[in-house]
Image: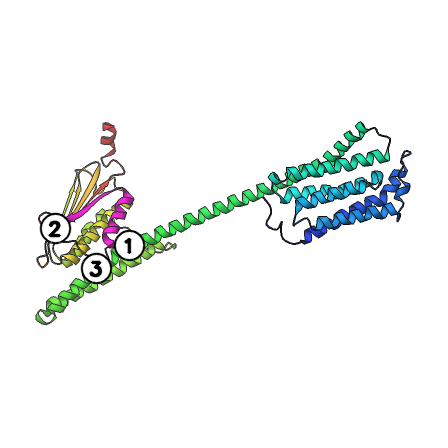
Amino acid sequence: MVSADTDRGVGSADVIIGAASTVFSVAMLVALPAVIAAEPSAGSVASLTPLGASWWLLISGLLLQGLVIVSARRRPRAALVAAAFVAFGLSLASLGAAASILNVAVSVLVFLAVWRVSLSRLPLTLLSAGVLVAAAEMVNRMQSSASNPGEAVLLAVIQSLGVVGIPLLVGLFVRGRKDVREARRGEQQARTGERDAQIAAAVARERTAMARELHDIAAHHLSGIALMAAVVDRQIDTAPEEAHRGVQQVRAQSTRVLDDLRRLVGLLRDDEGGERSVETLGTVPELVATARAQGPIELRISTADGRDLGAGIGPLAQLAVFRTIQEALTNAATHAPGTPRSVEIDDRDDARLVVTVTNAASPSSVPASSRVPASSSGGFGLLGMLERAELVGADLQYGPRETGGWQVRASVPREADPRPAEIAQADG
């Protein structure tokens, strides 16, 4: 894949690479006459006299290739072919072995092309550059030695493989390392994004749970306070003593809602000082006693002999049952105020616990079977009960009764065998 800046302008890195390649090639050119002079068979040394025509021609070619490298960012493939064509063109000027110095820029551009261009777009470019390098080397060999054509072709092919093949392999290796780093970076970013998404989901779940808890607490207590305040308003002139007791109940109910809110905040805080008590089946009688201020309630609890209430029911499921009872009583007090209510906890089955909350039809309203109850809290109570039931795998059913009124029934599976260990082992 082409890098983001391949087709844009000239970067400082290109200038540095072009300058370094030119300086290195010129240094080789300066040192080449002394190297060739040590060879008895060197026939082109005279043409490489410093400041001579051939010398300046070769310097011009090196400078031209340096400019090609500087501009290679825009079109790496065209720059590679252009540098190889410069090398081939100057080989025709009878420069001999010195013209091989021009291959330095070709090797640099091979590496840059591999680095910047998709590999699928390079085969034709690399083949063209290789052919031009081989042709230039073959011309140089034929001019500077008595090599026969077959030997010149073989040496030209070897030279082409070295000039193009070696930087190609180096470029592939470096690019592979770069791709691995980018893949690891992308994987790390993906993991970070996944972790952030998990955190966001957890926060959303916590916010939903907190909103549900606040709804349950506020709806239960504040609806009771509203009902008691309405009763006090009617009694304040006709029955002052009863109104006085009603005000005391309002105050007690207000204190309880504050305590419940503090408990909820304590559960959300990180410090160890916050209250962390959680409602269970054992606290249902206290809930019913508090709710009796809004009307008569009958509580029936049936358990098997020799075991505690809610045995085998986990704390989360017990909290869900408690909130279901609380919400059902609140809805009954809101939509059928003053009517008898009942709470039944059947804990005799070894597989599940069943809770049923019922209320009679309000005499001042139409029968429950012919209307859909409206919720002053916006209808989130039933939704909250359903979400809690799904969370603990319970079966929740609610609706009007044939005899009038409303019924909520929750069947909660047990997480463990409620029977004593010796009986469970014997049956197992």
Task: Give the amino acid at mark 1.
Answer: Glu
275 vs 51, nearest the viewer: 51
Q: Is residue 277 above or below residue 224?
A: above
The residue that label 1 is drawn on is 213
Q: Position of residue 187 (x, y in %)?
A: 51, 43
Q: Is residue 393 above or below residue 427?
A: below
- Mark closer to the chain start, 2 or 3: 2
Q: Which residues are magenta?
A: 378-403
Task: Point out which mark residue 376 bears.
Answer: 3
Q: Position of residue 39 (x, y in %)?
A: 89, 35
Q: Kindly state the secondary structure of the residue where label 1 is placed.
A: helix
Q: Kindly state the secondary structure of the residue where label 3 is placed.
A: loop
Instruction: Name which quarter of the figure residue 83 lies in.
Output: top right
Please tell me how crowded label 2 is: few (under 14), some (14-19), or many (20+) other residues with Cα within 10 Å.
some
Instruction: Name which quarter of the figure residue 140 lies in.
Output: top right
The residue that label 2 is drawn on is 369
Give the number of callouts: 3
Please tell me how crowded label 3 is: few (under 14), some (14-19), or many (20+) other residues with Cα within 10 Å.
few
264 vs 50, nearest the viewer: 50
